[in-house]
Amino acid sequence: MEENLDKNTEVNKEISDKTTKSNSEEIKGPKSEKVINMNNGDSATKVVIKNEINTPEKPITKPKKELPVEKKPFLEFINIHLIPSLTEEITQRGLEINNINLTNTNRPIAGDKCWVINCEIKDTCNFWLSFEKDDISSLKSISLSKPNQKPSIIESFLIDEKRITLNLIISRVLQRLNGQKLIGIN
């Protein structure tokens, strides 16, 4: 009987030594299982957690960042982002747009072929925003006129800007219209 007590004492001492280091300490067994010794007050418990078949972990792939709208193809940028945003900004100022469209046509005054956004604001003005190529960073110009008149001046547009953004184009169009006292109070 003393032999059994001695063996139990040794086992308890071994378990006690392993669990007194910390309340729960992880001991790694073979790759397919984890052995955790836990000390709950007076008693020590051994828990075996078996893993599923050793399968390699799948690498976590980061979701692709969506391209900024300015990097999208020209026609998509103009038709899906610029024209609707410009329309919204103008209508928020209490003005009504009769017509706004993008065409590959002759630039007002100069007559060279390019991409032109023509916008007619009811009882206020017309403007033509021209892009030399199907690229928002290409050379741009703007022309303005009062309703039912032809434009008489063509001006360069955003020539010093290194980075052309949707918000920049919109703000500068509105700034140009406001500068001519066509929208709002100057």
Image (spheres, rainbow, N blue to C red):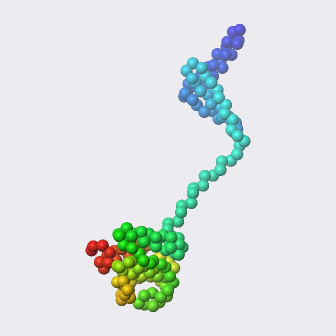
State left or right for residue 96 relative to residue 114: left
Q: Position of residue 78 (x, y in %)?
A: 49, 74
Name the residue nearer the viewer: 11 or 104: 104
Name the one closer to the observer, 123 or 63: 123
Can residue 156 be seen from the camera position used here?
A: no
Q: Is residue 170 left or right of residue 12?
A: left
In-image side of 130 versus 153 (left or right): right
Q: Farthest right residue? A: 53
* Farthest left residue in view: 186
The image shows residue 96, relative to residue 152, as above or below, that is above
Exactly how many numbered labels are in the figure? 0
Q: Nearer the viewer, residue 163 or 135?
A: 135
Q: Position of residue 131 (x, y in %)?
A: 46, 81
Residue 91 in picture, x, y percent from top left: 39, 70
Q: Quadrant of residue 154?
A: bottom left
**On-image quarter of the C terminus:** bottom left
Q: Residue at x 57, y 29 (%)?
A: 24
